[in-house]
């Protein structure tokens, strides 16, 4: 746990340093524009991409802490494993398809195919919302089976882990909605290409994290 705290402190120091060099109120994962709009033309990576990766590093650290706490609690005794609702398999498939749809939108953006971008963004949004609804039904099934938020540590971790991941999906949907709004207001692809790329990267990261979390939840 100490190592994890030190790692988080290091990540926090990097984030503060980076913010000191950039706009403190900027939200780089919501940035729009083309690669040519970057303030530093000599940079190999846009500032928005760097900001997104720093953000993802922090989010990854958060989930790493949750997983560490999960296994630590499991070894403390009085651990009654909670069953993983079967609907989680369907939900995982929905998130995989959502990530594929965003990758489709990214490729369409590079080909300057606005119709493809719109179709990819819309499909990704619908599938992500279906994923969240499926997660809600997973909670309902677990609750109906008698595994409540309190009284069972394994069930509490299930609600916590899936809830935190769901909040990050909702945050991604906000950014995705902003990108969709721009896509439906303009026929030019270049102004939203970077936003589409950032959304796709974020979505792939959420899928990667979910696959790890799903494997952890299946661990008995």
Image: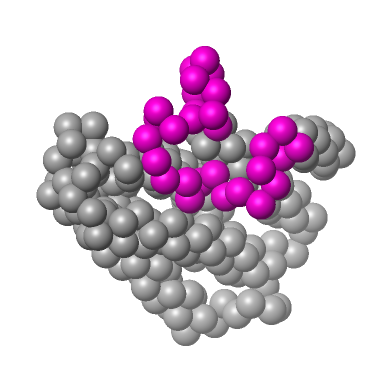
Say whether residue 190 is left or right of residue 29: left
Decide whether residue 27 is among the magenta residues.
yes
The image quadrant that residue 85 belongs to is bottom left
Residue 47 in view: yes
Residue at figure coordinates x 44%, y 62% from the top left: 174
The spot of residue 189 in percent (x, y) is 24, 42
Q: Is residue 105 above or below residue 185?
A: above
Name the outermost residue toward the right.
2
Count of marks placed on residues: 0
Task: Inspect the magenta stretch and tell me whether residue 10 lies in it.
Answer: no
Q: Is residue 216 left or right of residue 99?
A: right
Relative to 122, is 214 on the left or the right? right
* Residue beneath the point at 42% across and 45% down: 32
Q: Nearer the viewer, residue 207 or 42?
A: 42
Location of residue 15 (image quadrant) = top right
Nearer to me, 112 or 177: 112
- Identify which residue is drawn at 58% across, 61% down: 164
Q: What range of the chain is rendered magenta?
A: 19-47
> Could you tell me residue 154's position as x and y percent?
63, 64
Check the image and report above or below for 125 versus 66.
below
Which quadrant of the structure image shows residue 188?
top left
Secondary structure predominantly adopted by residues drawn in magenta = loop
In the rendered image, the quadrant that contains the N terminus is: top right
């Amino acid at each position: 746990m100490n190592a994890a705290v030190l790692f988080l402190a290091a990540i926090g120091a990097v984030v503060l340093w980076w913010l000191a060099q950039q706009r403190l109120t900027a939200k780089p994962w919501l940035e729009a524009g083309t690669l040519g709009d970057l303030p530093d033309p000599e940079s190999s990576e846009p500032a928005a991409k760097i900001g997104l990766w720093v953000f993802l590093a922090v989010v990854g650290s958060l989930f790493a802490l949750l997983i560490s706490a999960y296994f630590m609690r499991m070894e403390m005794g009085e651990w009654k494993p909670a069953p993983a609702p079967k609907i989680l398999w369907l939900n995982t498939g929905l998130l995989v398809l959502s990530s594929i749809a965003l990758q489709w939108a990214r490729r369409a953006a590079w080909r300057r195919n606005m119709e493809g971008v719109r179709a990819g963004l819309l499909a990704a949004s619908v599938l992500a919302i279906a994923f969240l609804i499926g997660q809600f039904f997973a909670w309902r099934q677990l609750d109906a089976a008698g595994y409540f938020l309190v009284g069972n540590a394994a069930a509490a971790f299930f609600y916590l882990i899936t809830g935190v991941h769901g909040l990050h999906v909702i945050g991604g949907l906000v950014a995705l909605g902003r990108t969709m709004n721009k896509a439906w207001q303009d026929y030019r692809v270049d102004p939203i290409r970077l936003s589409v790329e950032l959304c796709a990267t974020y979505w792939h990261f959420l899928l990667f994290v979910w696959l790890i979390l799903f494997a952890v939840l299946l661990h008995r």
